[in-house]
Image: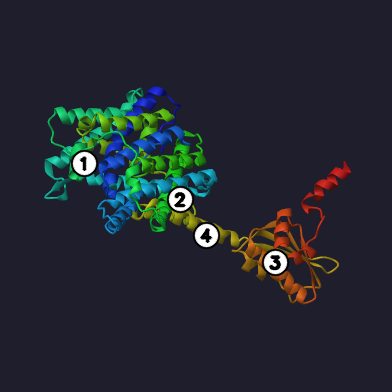
Amino acid sequence: MELLERGSKNVKNDILSGLTVALALVPEAVAFAFVAGVEPLVGLYAAFMIGLVTSILGGRPGMISGATGALAVVMVSLVSEGNQMGLEWATPVENAGLYYLFATVILMGLIQIVCGVFKLGKFVRLIPHPVMMGFVNGLAIVIFVAQLGMFTQVVDGQHVWLKGFDLWMMIGLVLSTMAIIYFLPKLTKKIPAGLVAILAVSLVAIFGGFDVATVGSFVRDSGGSGIKGGLPIPQIAVLKQLPFNMDTFYFILPYSVILAAIGLIESLMTLNLIDEITETRGNANRECVAQGTANILTGIFGGMGGCAMIGQSIINIQNGGRGRLSGIVAALALLSFILFGSSYIEMVPIAALVGVMFMVVIGTFEWATFKVIHKIPMTDAIVIVLVTSLTVVFDLAVAVGAGVVVSALVFAWESAKRIRARKSVREDGTKVYEIWGPLFFGSTSTFMQKFDIRNDPEKVEIDFIESKISDQSAVEAISSLVSKYESLGKQVVLMHLSEDCKRLLIKADAHLSSVIENNIDDPRYYVVTDIMEQV
């Protein structure tokens, strides 16, 4: 992250940075469209519409959204199953998977809007820092590995690694791009280094007559005919062909929920990352609504859906894009490429875009991980490695979910071990248990072991001044403890409970109101009271 510079909003920087981002969006959108099993324009339209809507309405200026690989992976089975279902319609349709995809994306958007309206975006704050570190490290590795596929060529219908001169030419252009991005800011920061690098390497490749892979050849090798197209139009006629019944709803609902969850997790974690880099704060709930609105529109207009893109967002921030204008320019530039500039964009060498993405990898990866990994608690180190690995092997949602669960379990285990009971006996023979630490499901067993019910005197006081009753398990433990004392004819009193703890106990077991001490002073203030009286 040290390579990324903080800065204020600037119109010129936003415009130029937006153009750089637009160039980097093209191969990404095309690649993700093929992963999902749809045409390149479906991915490009999604990148345009989602990028435009979230830039205008989103909660994080400077963040870039579009078609992403995390969502595309889920869409593969959706499109495949949808195609099979289409063949069983009364009038069979071969590409019905696309129809189901559009409907799923619309429902996905509705779910995301609901999450924003009910302010569920705030729960991203519960994600621990080790999970965040694992997330960015894993995503950096995923971006890096994805670029390695660009070092291949199609031979007899199969992708094989480049060799000889072609390989060295590719490496040379990639390194040249990276060198420009690294050294140009040391000379001037008036123009985005990424844009200069792409243009310079493109001119060298074109006028030097080098036979290198380009955006156009990449699209054709992937099975497409190009990126040229018209304005996106509403796909109402397509959506009307879907059988609107409960079978369709039950089919698209699980996919919609999964896509909505993955989209929001990736978007909100990217939002947090950009907040950290720019030392500003975005609005997570507003971003949820914007992402949902964008996905509804892209579903209606024939896009594949999407979410925030950490790679392109880093490119934007790295090149000085801080305001909403940068995302708007990127989206409109992408649309202009589709409408007017496809022949020029298809001439851009893939090596230039790979070089840009490699610099994104360097800027994204938390290199400080290697410095702190042996200094932090072992459990945090395990979480970082776990989340990083799962992000690479599976996907973001699985990785973050596993990281949060493991972190929560570790926290619960450590908190459970902190329950203490200091025992003392007053002059009148009353035994006092002073409880320290949180009482919840993880600590109830240890809590119960602190008491010697059978051998305790006739009167027992349990002091909760340094403890808190947190959940139903704690309530049940106290209720059981009181019942055991009373079954032996002993009197038990619960002291110094907070008002919320009293309400929780009485609501669960009305009998407990008779053993709760009311209107008692807090002993922590005795000394202060004594001093005030002396004054």
Residue linked to disc 3: 478
Q: Nearer the viewer, mark 2 or mark 3?
A: 3
Q: Is residue 222 left or right of residue 64?
A: left
Q: Of 194 and 342, which appears nearest the observer?
A: 342
Q: Position of residue 36 (x, y in %)?
A: 29, 49
Please tell me whether residue 325 is drawn above or below residue 144 in the rendered image. above
Residue linked to disc 2: 131
Q: Amino acid at mark 3?
A: Ile
Q: Is residue 530 left or right of residue 524?
A: right
**Whole-Å distance between the Cαs marked 2 and 3?**
35 Å
Q: Nearer the viewer, mark 4 or mark 1?
A: 1
Q: Nearer the viewer, mark 1 or mark 2?
A: 1
Q: Is residue 507 left or right of residue 26?
A: right
Sequence order check: which comes first, mark 1 or mark 2? Answer: 2
| Residue 409 numbered tag | 4
Residue linked to disc 1: 219
Q: Residues within 10 Å of mark 4 (few under 14, many from 20)?
A: few
**Whole-Å distance between the Cαs marked 4 and 3?**
23 Å
Q: Amino acid at mark 2?
A: Val
